[in-house]
Amino acid sequence: MAEVEPGQDPVGEDPRIASLEERIERAEQIEKIRTGERDEKADENTRLGNRVLAELIGGLAGGALVGWVLDRFLGTQPWLLLVFLFLGIIVAFRNIYRISMQRPKE
C-alpha cells in the first residue's frame, strides 16, 4: 500500500464529503422554498394556464358583450347575443387548440 504524506487526503471519494454535499443540496432546496424562489418551468406552465383561461373567458365575455350591444341597437333580443356567444365559444376553443398544439421550447 502506498504511503500517504501527512496533510493529504487519500485518493477516492470520502463518504463524509458526499454526505456533506447531500445536506448542502437539501438545505439549498429548503432555502429556495422558504424565500419563495420559483422554478422557471413552473412559472412557464403557470403563464400558459393563465393564457388558456384568459382565452376562454375573453371569448365568452367578448362574444356576449358584442351580441348584447348589437341586440340593444337592432332590437333583435336575444338572437344576436346567442349567435355571438356561440361564436365567442368557437373562437376561444380554436385558440386553446392552437395553444395546445405549439411545441414546447427547449
Image (cartoon, grey):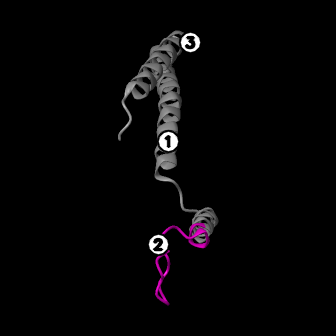
Q: CA distance from mark 3 to mark 2?
A: 83 Å
Q: Nearer the viewer, residue 1 or 14?
A: 1
Mark 1 Cα-neighbour bin, 10 Å: few <14, some 14–19, many ≥20: few
- The dominant secondary structure in magenta is loop
**What secondary structure is found at the residue carrying circle 3?**
loop
Q: Which residues are magenta?
A: 1-18
Residue type (three-letter) at the residue carrying disc 3: Pro
The foreground one among 29 and 57 is 29
Q: Residue furthest bottom?
A: 6
Q: Secondary structure at mark 2?
A: loop
Q: Residue at x 49, y 90 (%)?
A: 6
Three-letter amino acid code of the residue under disc 2: Val
Q: Is residue 72 magenta?
A: no
- Marks 1, 2: nearer the viewer: 2
Q: Nearer the viewer, residue 30 or 50?
A: 30
Q: Secondary structure at mark 1?
A: helix
Q: Residues within 10 Å of mark 2 (few under 14, many from 20)?
A: few
| Residue 8 is a magenta residue | yes
Q: In the image, which is nearer the foreground, mark 3 or mark 1?
A: 1
Type of the residue with mark 1: Asn
Q: Which mark is residue 11?
A: 2
First in sequence: mark 3 or mark 1?
1
As drawn, the label of residue 78 is 3
Q: Are marks 1 and 2 in contact (CB under 8 Å)?
A: no
The quarter of the displayed image where residue 23 is located: bottom right
Question: Does residue 60 lie above or below 8 as drawn?
Answer: above
Q: Position of residue 2 (x, y in %)?
A: 46, 77
| Residue behind mark 1 | 45
Q: CA distance from mark 1 to mark 2?
A: 45 Å
